[in-house]
Image (cartoon, rainbow, N blue to C red):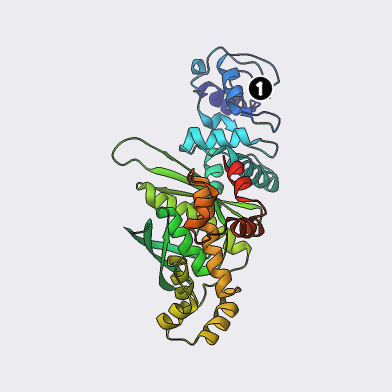
């Protein structure tokens, strides 16, 4: 490289980027959309093969001969790059092993930016776009603090900050992430499913960081979020918050629901097996007619529908995570008549309990 620089300085001539041994692109691979993995190209480079398959001219046997290494910065991302090239850069350069289901979305995002800018993207630029779109997004709300206790699963106190104000939402779940998710759903009145969760360490040592990936599913569309922290629980919550922020932004949700309806729905969620309009009326010092009308107006469903929704969610979890019979699941969520339970489940999810369980296997 020093010889090339001296040559250009003394002669005033430019060494083309594709000139063997000295050109900038001599060890560069452009990831094409037809390649399923960038690693194939790197192996090809390491073997010292020549040709045009990876848009590379003649290669010497070893890049170290001319002061180069097999690093991810030899991969240039452009508008025709595939998901493999983007994923390779994020993994090799920054330690992010994207879930298989996430690679395509990220790949399209990055190559779309390259196309719009009409230029190649270097690794630092790829990471910047990835970070802006997936890591710790707080465009609508943030969750700065969570506290948990073990009681009937996990109970959480989740602090949600939005528009300069903070509110503590209490919710339960099968685990910490599920409890935080339920708090977010209750606060905004939104509905989605946690469809993917993956995690891995980014670096080694006592100060190692963890990356968590969360996908939520709403009306057939997937929203991805990524969290990074030394604490895997914090990383997973950050990933969930990032994904939920994307959903809230797309649905133009700018604020949470009134505090009273949040408390009422939370009470129903926590005691869906025993709650009645009478107990709810006594708890919140409201008449039953007013309470019924208020729930319908603010939550968009009747009291009975709110109770049924929680029972169905619990049933779905039991079908997915246990081997209990459908009859046992029905009884556990408050339905002695299994045929009635089957009809309600199919009405809610479009599948019978047996069909749902087979689908989730």
**Residue 157's quadrant in the figure?**
bottom left
* Residue 131 seen anywhere in this rendered image of the structure: no
Name the residue located 48 percent from the left edge and 58 percent from the top edge: 181
SS category of the residue bearing label 1: loop
Q: Residue at x 53, y 32 (%)?
A: 73
Q: Nearer the viewer, residue 322 or 149?
A: 322
User: Given the current orientation, which residue lies at the most extreme top position?
Assistant: 61
| Residue 119: % across, % down | 66, 42
The x, y position of residue 160, in whole percent, is 43, 67
Q: Is residue 273 above or below residue 74?
A: below
Residue lying furthest left in this view?
Answer: 206
Residue neighbourhood size for the residue with mark 1, other residues' Cα within 10 Å, grouped as few (<14), some (14–19), many (≥20): some
Which residue is at the front of the view, 300 or 288? 288
Q: Residue at x 61, y 33 (%)?
A: 84
- Residue at image position (55%, 69%) is 306
Seen in the picture, residue 297 relative to 196 is either above or below; the reply is below
Locate residue 170: give its quadrant.
Answer: bottom left
The residue carrying mark 1 is: 56
Q: Position of residue 211 (x, y in %)?
A: 44, 44
Q: Is residue 147 left or right of residue 323?
A: left
- Residue 243 visible in the current orientation: yes
What is the count of numbered marks?
A: 1
- Which quadrant of the rendered structure holds the C terminus? top right
Q: Quadrant of residue 289?
A: bottom right
In terms of depth relative to the viewer, which is nearer, 12 or 189? 189
Q: Where residue 254 sits: x, y (%)?
A: 56, 71
Q: Please identify the residue farthest to the front as the structure is shown.
A: 337
Q: Is residue 317 left or right of residue 232?
A: right
């Amino acid at each position: 490289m020093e010889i090339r620089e001296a040559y250009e300085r003394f002669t005033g001539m430019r060494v083309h980027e594709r000139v063997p041994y000295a050109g900038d692109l001599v060890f560069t691979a452009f990831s094409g959309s037809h390649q399923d993995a960038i690693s194939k190209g790197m192996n090809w480079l390491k073997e010292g093969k020549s040709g045009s398959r990876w848009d590379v001219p003649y290669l010497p046997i070893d890049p170290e001969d001319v002061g180069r290494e097999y690093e991810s910065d030899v991969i240039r991302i452009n508008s025709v790059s595939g998901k493999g090239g983007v994923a390779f850069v994020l993994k090799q350069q920054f330690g992010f092993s994207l879930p298989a289901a996430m690679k395509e979305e990220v790949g399209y995002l990055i190559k779309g930016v390259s196309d719009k800018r009409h230029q190649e993207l270097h690794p630092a630029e790829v990471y910047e776009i990835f970070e802006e779109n997936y890591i710790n997004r707080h465009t609508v709300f943030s969750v700065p603090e969570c506290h948990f206790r073990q009681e009937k699963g996990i109970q959480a106190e989740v602090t949600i900050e939005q528009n300069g104000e903070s509110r503590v939402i209490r919710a339960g779940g099968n685990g910490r992430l599920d409890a935080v998710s339920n708090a977010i759903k209750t606060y905004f009145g939104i509905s989605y499913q946690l469809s993917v969760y993956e995690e891995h360490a980014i670096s080694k040592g006592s100060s190692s960081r963890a990356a968590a990936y969360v996908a939520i599913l709403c009306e057939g569309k997937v929203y991805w979020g990524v969290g990074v922290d030394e604490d895997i629980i914090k990383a997973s919550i950050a990933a969930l918050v990032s994904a939920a922020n994307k959903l809230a932004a797309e649905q133009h949700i700018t604020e949470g629901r009134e505090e009273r309806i949040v408390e009422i729905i939370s009470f129903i969620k926590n005691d869906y097996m025993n709650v009645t309009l009478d107990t709810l009326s006594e708890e919140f010092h409201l008449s039953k007619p007013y309470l019924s009308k208020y729930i319908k107006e603010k939550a968009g469903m009747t009291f009975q529908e709110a109770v049924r929704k929680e029972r169905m969610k619990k049933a779905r979890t039991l079908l997915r995570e246990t081997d209990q019979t459908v009859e046992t699941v029905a009884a556990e969520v408050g339905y002695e008549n299994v045929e009635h339970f089957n009809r309600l489940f199919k009405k809610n999810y479009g599948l019978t309990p047996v069909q749902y369980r087979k689908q989730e296997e």
